[in-house]
Amino acid sequence: MRLKNILVGLSWILVSGLHSCVDDRGNYDYTDVDELIPITISGLEDTTVMMRSVLHIVPELGNIKDEARYSYLWYTIPKNVFGYIPRRDTLSREKELNVEITYESGNYHLIYEIRDTLLDVYTNKDVTMVVQSNIGKGWYVLKDVNEKTDFDYVNLKGEKTENLIAEAGEEALLGKAVKIVFQGELYTPVIENPDGTSTQLDNKKAFFVLSEQDMKIFNADNMNLFKTFEECFYEAPGVRRLQNCVYNSWNDYLINDGKIYSICGQSMNSGMFGFARPGMYDLHSDMITTYYGTLLFDKNNRTFYDAAANGVTLNKLAEDIGGGISPSTMPVDLIRMLPRDETNPGLGYAVMENKDKGEYYVFDISYDMTNYPFVGIDTIPVSCEMPRAEIMTANRVASCIYYVKNEPGEDVLKVYKSIAGDNRESELKKFPGEKIVYIENVVTPYGTAPADVFNNLVVLTNSSSGWKLYRFNIIGQTPEIETEPVVVYSGQGNARYVMFRGKN
């Protein structure tokens, strides 16, 4: 009973105290903050600024007399953030703002604070600062000059910015260019800070840039360097022979020196590739991604495998219960594996060669990591040139493969059609004095405004005057193209690869 009485007494004291705080009608004097610091701020409005440009603001202050007693502070806080607490960042402690903006694109609170250092009171003004990136939607041409890799950017208006890596103050990659990949969301790198601590970043956009000897990962908003080659891996491989990289369905896949690495984006990660899948295998550089893994071909064992993004092994594929050709220990070699659409996983072609029989085949692939992968196998007529071409790509819709034939003084763009009979190949366009180095069927992503939708066959060429990028309209759902290009972009250097970025 004593304990109960004590608890009741404490409860009464707390309630009484709370009541007295609420209903306290004591005679206190309060001074309005505007009387303590009557300064007014004008000349500061909502603003839009381009990334890496200088923002200069001269505020107009009223009712200020002794400026020596005041301190000034400019800072920002991100707007509309989800999943983490927004961080305040100090821009300046000067009366006027004069600073280079290196933030990622987005909306920010821009706050100007004036503090009376004697009374320790302050007033401020909060406006919106919209940061826009000078890189975004458009065409990215990966190239090399004197075996140093960089890339140019052509925006949707056709305006070109050269050498984005050098422009950002970073070192170009050593070696000939291989590929550039855009990851538009969910990159979560761990960044080492100068004081020895580390920070986990959230939902970033990234460029994966590959040369034959190097790889770097950049922030795709402001070109800040996220990772060097050594930092891209939990354990960096001893041999640098970068072959291919693909991002699809939250996951990243990399082939280096015939080994497969991955980053599983379905769970929190450090933005680094895990360990290579173990085994005595040597992968072809081509792959076709699925939603949760990637389809690969081992040149040593002539076997198709898949590698799940969150797995640690190479996995054999299902056999055809109807007795079709086995995807394991095959009597054929892979020439090319061609994705039909890296955003529509598991669809593509495999061009195969049987050296003993002197035959070539096209395997039609539709695969989701659980089923037998080949939905059709077609023998290519012996007269066809396509299997011996170095450059080829698949049409996303029509059953055909575009390829390049090298002829004296010019390259010829041709098409192989999956039709009955021997007359399967036809010429589309000649490129006198130019060498075609890359072709791809590029379409605008889902959700693009109708006025901006296109379905192009893009052709990247090199010549003594530099690179050219041609965009040809594909006619409907056919293999044919309009032979007059929609537009032609050009630049300097030896181009190797082109990527279209369809969203900011």
Image: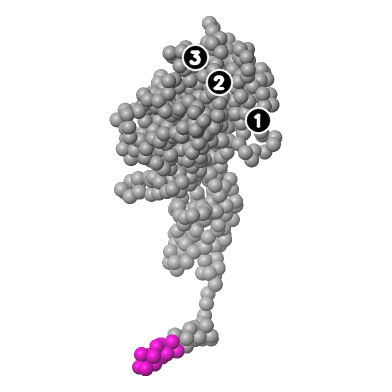
Of circles 1 and 3, which is in front?
Answer: 3
Q: Quadrant of residue 171?
A: top left
Looking at the magenta stretch, what is its main secondary structure?
Answer: helix
Above or below 178: residue 233: below
Residue 151 visible in this rendered orientation of the protein: no
Circles 3 and 2: CB atoms closer than 8 Å: no
Q: Which residue is mark 2?
A: 378
Q: Amino acid at mark 1?
A: Phe
- Where disc 2 sits, the SS reads strand
Residue 463 spot, x, y in % from top left: 52, 14
For mark 1, give the secondary structure.
loop
Residue 470's disc number: none
Q: Residues within 10 Å of mark 3 (few under 14, many from 20)?
A: some
| 198, above or below 273, in the image | below
- Disc nearer the start of the sequence (3/2): 3
Q: Which residue is the site of mark 3?
A: 359
Q: Nearer the viewer, residue 71 or 284?
A: 284
Residue 474 vs residue 381, the one in the foreground? 381
Q: Is residue 351 visible?
A: yes
Is residue 5 in the magenta section? yes
The number of numbered badges drawn on the structure is 3
Range of residues picked out in magenta:
1-13
Disc 1 versus disc 2: distance between alpha carbons? 31 Å
- Return the residue at label 1: 454
Query: What's the residue at 63%, 25% (across, down)?
Result: 398
Instruction: Give the mark nearest the N terminus, 1 or 2.
Output: 2
